[in-house]
Amino acid sequence: MKLDNATNTEVTGNTFTANKYALQVFGGSNHTISKNLISDSTYQGVRFENTTGNAFDGNTVEGNPTGLALLTSTGNAITNNSFNNNQNYGIHLVTSPNNTLSGNTFSGNGTDVYEQ
C-alpha cells in the first residue's frame, strides 16, 4: 500500500505479507497505522519518508530486512508495537529527529533501533 502526499488516512487491522514494502508513506501527515500484521517483506516492512505527525501503534512487524524505516520524518509516535526477527533493524531512523518511541518490544532483530 502506498500513501503519497495524503493526509488523515487510517490503516487498521490488515495483514501485509511478502511484499517489497508492505506500506509506504511519502509526504503528507497525520496518518494512523494501527493493529496491522506486517511480515516477510523483501525490503522494508514500513517506510515513512518526508512525513510528519503520524501514529504507528499496536502493530506486529516481523521477518523483514528492516521493520520500520523513517527517512527525514519527524513528529511521529511509534508506540506499543512488536518488532521481531527483522534481519537488519527493527526500527531504522535516518535524519529523523523528534520522533517518540514508547512501549515497543523487540526480539531477535539484527539491531533493535538504529539512528543515523
Image (cartoon, helix red, strand yellow):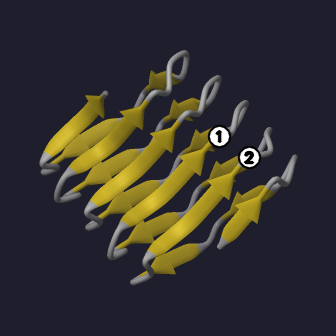
Q: Which mark is residue 27?
A: 2
Q: Secondary structure at mark 2?
A: loop
SS for callout 1: loop
Left/right of residue 60 with respect to residue 52 in the rendered view: left
Quadrant in the rendering for residue 9: bottom right
> Residue 50: which numbered mark, if any?
1
Name the residue furthest top.
Answer: 98
Front residue of 65/37: it is 65
Task: Give the mark nearest the N terminus, 2 or 1.
Answer: 2
The amino acid at mark 2 is: Gly
Q: Residue at 51% x, 76% y: name it.
A: 16
Quadrant containing the N terminus is bottom right
| Quarter-of-image position of residue 4 | bottom right
For the residues labelled 2 and 1, the Cα–Cα distance comes to: 5 Å
- Residue at image position (65%, 23%) is 75
Q: Position of residue 102 (x, y in %)?
A: 45, 24
